[in-house]
Amino acid sequence: MTKKNFILLFFCVLAVMLHAEISIHGTDYLVTKAAEESEVDSVMVVKSLEDVNLVYMVDEGGEPSKFSWYQFDLNGGVELLKQEAEAVTETEVTISKEAHSMGYAVLNDKNEVKMTVWIFLYSDYKPSNCFVTFDSDSKDWCYIVNVFFHKDVKAMEYVNPGDAEPKFTLKQQYYLSYDSTYYESQSYITEEIGYFVDDDYNYVLPAPLDSTKFTFKGTRFSMAFDDTVKVVSEATYMPYAVETHMLSSVRIREDATNERDRGEPREAQESVTRLKGSAPLNVEVLNYSSPAAFFYDWTLSSDNQYNSVIAKIKDRDFRYTFAESGTYYLRGEVSNSSITETDNMGCTQRKEFVIEVLTSALDVPNVFTPNGDGKNDIFKVAYKSIIKFHGSVYNTWGRLIYDWDDPSDGWDGTINGKPAAEGAYLYIIEATGDDKDEKGNRIKYVKKGTVSLIR
């Protein structure tokens, strides 16, 4: 077969290709897809060429043939390696250990090209003279880091059968790793992560949250063949990026009589940015910041533009008791630099909260039905922002039958553990609200009346 005819046959590869398998026996290898514009079916990288055979097997249902093996090189040269004397469904050819990088094709006895493959010898393309460095002196240092590595490596070039041009290049992909720190369950965890990156000089990676060194471990082929080239950056990267997770909650005071209806959430949650409850309202925001953060700034205001500042707090966490009703705005900031109007060069993260402290209120029902159905079974008040409370219930003869000091409690309709008779009962309720009147005095509530017990 002439070289010209051999080339022409490759134009019909897709038309006559059968499902079949080509593999290598005698060494470890990796298979990768060839360039879409290439006529080569696949590219293989082998660890060794000592006693290595290239094997082609016809898929089930395929016809046997007197297969022929051809070898082609980067210069457009084509050479017949082997021709089967009899029709077979499996054929193989020994690859010369001197061949190094070369293309191979198998044709049937009708001169139809069944499969083409290009083989690279891994050791010819192993990187050398490698070093890694980084540049964190960037306007984007809060978000990214530029990592550079140098290496000397031979380009992995291959061609179509019988052609010297065009040449296609197999990207080796290089493995870079470093220690990554991430937040999980109210703590920061550090573990090594890595990237396979293409054959470029400069790589942009997410800015690490803690100190680390960058490591070049070789190519995807050296990693697969357990022949890594470990090169570590001389300098240690010091973090600039800041991450924070703020968990807010309404704190419960054990010594307060009306804290059981104080508002939600009771447990710290990061997803909650609106807090609500009766005064005095104790709010706590726990701040979990990444290692680079060491400046903390909390601004509390009565307006959402923070023009009127109530308090400035520099602690890591925020704790504050809201004594007056109203709507408040809280902004928390963490930074690796001092936060001032003239000097804010560091990386900063912030989060905002809205806190609603309820105006005091006290309402007393005029009927309750303690019949055990779970609805209106207890005579109790509805209240907001009550800081002092006392309630009493009397029968029609004026005898005290129940009293209580916690507005979240109430009378269950029993006397000495036995159900009270249906009818009207007198009550006297006195309470003090957290808010104040025009003279600056706490709001007082005195409620007197009757409640009907109906079963």
Image (cartoon, rainbow, N blue to C red):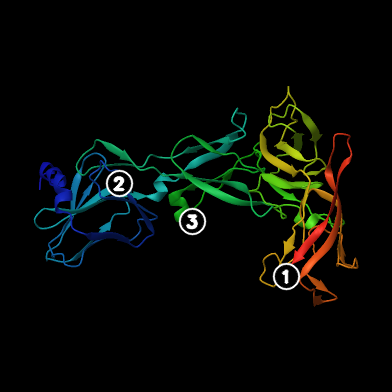
Residue sticking out furthest to the bottom = 418
Give the image location of residue 49, x and y in percent.
Answer: 35, 56
The residue lying at 73 percent from left, 64 percent from top is 368
Q: Nearer the viewer, residue 106 or 200?
A: 200
Q: Which residue is mark 1?
A: 370
Q: Label 2: how many residues lie within 10 Å, few (<14), some (14-19) or many (20+)?
A: some
Give the image location of residue 419, x and y in percent.
Answer: 78, 75
- State which mark lies toward you, 1 or 3: 1
Q: Which residue is mark 2?
A: 34
Q: Which amino acid type is shown beneath numbered disc 1?
A: Pro
Give the image location of residue 305, x and y in percent.
Answer: 69, 29
Marks 1 and 2, how far apart at CA: 81 Å
* Residue 288 shown left or right of residue 107 in the figure: right
Question: How many numbered markers are drawn?
Answer: 3
Say above or below: 11 vs 375.
above
Q: Which amino acid type is shown beneath numbered disc 3?
A: Asp
Residue 388 is marked as none
Give the image location of residue 135, x and y in percent.
Answer: 59, 32
- State which mark lies toward you, 2 or 3: 2
* Dot 2 or dot 3, earlier in sequence: 2
